Image (cartoon, rainbow, N blue to C red):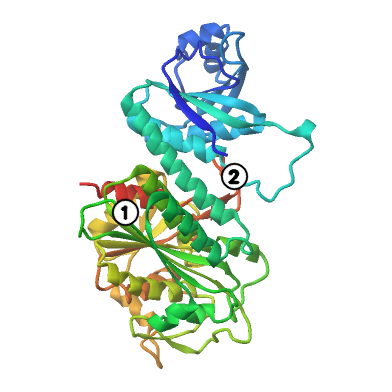
Amino acid sequence: MAPEIQLSSAAVAEFSTALLAVAMDENPGAATLDDLDRALGGELRRSIAAREFRGARDELLQFTGTATGARRVMLVGMGKPGDRAGGLRRAAAVAARQAGKLGSGDLAFHGGVLGEREVESVTTGLLAGAWEYKDLKSPPPEEERRAPLGRVTILAADNPENRAAMDAGQAIGAGHSLARTLAMMPGNLCTPQFLADTAKQLADRHGFKLTVLGRAEMTAEGMGSFLSVAQGTPQDPKLIALEYSGGKRGEKPITLVGKGLCFDSGGISIKPAQSMEDMKFDMCGAAGVLGAFDAIGRMKIPVNVVGLIGATTNMPSGTAVNPGDVVKSHLGKYIEVINTDAEGRLVLADVLSYARRFDPAVVIDAATLTGACVIALGHTATGVFGLDDALIGEVIAAGKRAGEPGWSMPLWDDYRDLIKSEVADIKNSGGRPAGAITAAMFLKEFTESYPWVHLDIAGTAYSDADLGAIPKGPTGIPTGTFIEFVRGRVT
């Protein structure tokens, strides 16, 4: 369960708590927090003066606390001064993770004078750090259990503005937690039907309109591209559509699209066995849509938003699509399937075509689409593709506010020659050169009736190493980017 979060205007040196986390920039002054330093017998000043704590990002230093205040004090480094809200978000996540490891039960967080943006960021960070996925683990023996983090107090002015910011941070944190939980679940539990059921729960909770198409309905729609991926699996594929009407009646909606491959074996073009278990994360785009919708519903953002998810599994079988097959898309274009492991774009082609019926103001899709994007940008930045520089800038700015950096990639017509087919209108793979770009070029073929941006999150949606602020596994990306983009469109 997520911890209870509250605000308190109490003095940092006097607040009684099991663990007090104090966030500091790199190279803090020795006179920092004089009242707390006096309560600690001068240890804070001496440690900073002796350079035992330098405030580097994620650096920790702990002190024994006081009889009447915090029982334990922990300094958390934020690194070089810059994006203060982002630094506080990360420091809060590190503090919450450490509190969980220590079993402190409750935590107080001090980051200096906090305004509304900083309170929201701290709240989001605390929830990110407190998140754990233990649903499938047997509990340890009782004598080895540590108290979960049940309560966190942000030491900041308890006024209406900061309370509203804290509520927004809790909504964003809940959306991230949902996205990460869905992504962390194994593929035999997080199935296309489970994603549809999760969408139903969100619709019931927040009053969204929900439409779910299965194999029969998609066949009637003529979604031959999507269904070609699903024809090798007995699981019923799902096209999930959520509609949130928070804006003006008749106002064109922002449309968020997510790839939902609940497991991707590669199909007939099967993947290598090593690390194939990570292909449960191939639905992180879909998880991001659901997480964003949970946050949007909680925050009641006054904008119309549509969420579309294409969910299936990609499996080899006697009925699976073969390399060389040609399928007809929902838009009517014929596609030559060169590589059955280039399946996400086949699913998204029909979902992007289906998006036309909502007359969207803009469409943003997110997909763990290509290993080529990981080669290009590593695990630091999401690849951002589009034709409208202003829209690309808007998306990148939203990602920056969310702590989810993106980088614009070219989408020039010169690259289209790589996906020309000799037997069909287009082929689904252009080979290794410019692989992330040709995948985006393929998607562009199905988006010409509305403004569109594609996010390739293959390198950023999950991590195979502990990132300090969050553990190994799903990052929650692109949930924050989606939320911030929608918030940025409020007029």
* Image x and y of residue 105, in percent: 62, 27
Secondary element under disc 2, as helix, strand or loop, is loop
- Depth check: give the residue in front, 20 or 49: 20
Instruction: Identify the residue at image location x=59%, y=24%.
Output: 61
* Image x and y of residue 397, in percent: 31, 48
Residue kind at label 1, given as amino acid type: Val
Instruction: Classify residue 348 as left or right of residue 17.
Output: left
Instruction: Identify the residue at image location x=62%, y=8%.
Output: 67
Residue marked by disc 2: 471
Q: Distance between the residues labelled 1 and 2?
A: 26 Å
Quadrant into which the N terminus falls: top right
The quarter of the displayed image where residue 281 is located? bottom right
Residue marked by disc 1: 395
Residue kind at label 2, given as amino acid type: Pro
Is residue 99 in view? yes
Position of 53 relative to 254 (above/below): above
- Depth check: give the residue in front, 104 or 40: 104
Q: How crowded is mark 2: few (under 14 residues within 10 Å), some or many (20 or more)?
A: some
Secondary element under disc 1, as helix, strand or loop, is helix
Instruction: Classify residue 335 as left or right of residue 188.
Output: left
Mark 1 vs 2, N-terminal side: 1
Is residue 429 in view? no
Position of 391 relative to 83 (above/below): below
- Depth check: give the residue in front, 387 or 364: 364
Instruction: Identify the residue at image location x=44%, y=76%.
Output: 346
Position of 189 relative to 235 (above/below): above
Q: How many marks?
A: 2
